[in-house]
Image (spheres, grey):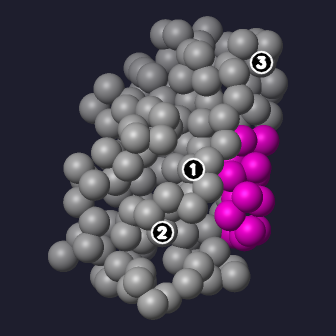
């Protein structure tokens, strides 16, 4: 069983709130499927754990916007945040925008940690390493996206996937 959550469910919910395409859904499901404690979805009677242990952070890095959302294990949206990509035109500025949006989504969810992070980004991408060189973001060439996410949010599994998959 895949944590009571199918790829179409995550992908559809993520797209529905403007977090991006299939890459975020695929990456988020990858986090859900890899996390050892996720064999059962959050029951309706359960609440969000104060420590975020029953939440996933999903991030979409695009040429127009960077968006993030926090979802429960069963795919229910808890919070979102987004920022325009324009104006973040250096390697580090673009990364700091990702950090800002992820932190904002987590703050709006009321948590300081999550069970894992899934991220979709344009390619080409070295997968599964998560090293990206998105054609629409020339600031990032051979950028270690998954590694940087793992350093920033070291709470659980990290999956970065091409958003066209």
Q: Which residue is mark 1?
A: 69
Main SS of the magenta segment? helix
Q: Residues within 10 Å of mark 3 (few under 14, many from 20)?
A: some
Classify residue 109 as left or right of residue 48: right
**Which one is earlier in the sequence, the residue at label 3 or at label 1?**
1
Residue at the limit of the structure toward the front, as seen here:
45
**Which one is earlier in the sequence, the residue at label 2 or at label 3?**
2
What residue range appears in magenta? 100-113
Badge 1 marks a residue whose secondary structure is strand
Residue 73 pos. (x, y %): 42, 71
Res. 72 mark: 2
Res. 146 mark: none
Badge 3 marks a residue whose secondary structure is loop
Residue 138 pos. (x, y %): 61, 9
Q: Which residue is mark 3?
A: 88
Badge 2 marks a residue whose secondary structure is strand
């Amino acid at each position: 069983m895949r944590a009571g959550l199918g790829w179409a469910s995550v992908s559809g919910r993520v797209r529905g709130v403007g977090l991006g395409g299939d890459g975020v859904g695929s990456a988020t499901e990858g986090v859900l499927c890899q996390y050892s404690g996720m064999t059962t979805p959050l029951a309706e009677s359960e609440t969000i754990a104060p420590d975020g242990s029953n939440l996933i952070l999903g991030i979409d890095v695009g040429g127009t916007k960077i968006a993030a959302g926090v979802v429960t294990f069963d795919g229910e949206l808890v919070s979102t945040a987004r920022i325009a990509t324009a104006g973040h035109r250096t390697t580090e500025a673009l990364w700091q925008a990702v950090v800002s949006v992820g932190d904002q989504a987590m703050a709006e969810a009321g948590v300081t940690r999550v069970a894992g992070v899934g991220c979709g980004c344009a390619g080409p991408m070295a997968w599964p390493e998560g090293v990206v060189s998105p054609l629409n973001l020339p600031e990032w060439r051979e950028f270690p996206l998954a590694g940087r996410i793992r350093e920033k949010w070291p709470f659980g599994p990290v999956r970065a996937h091409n958003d066209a998959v």
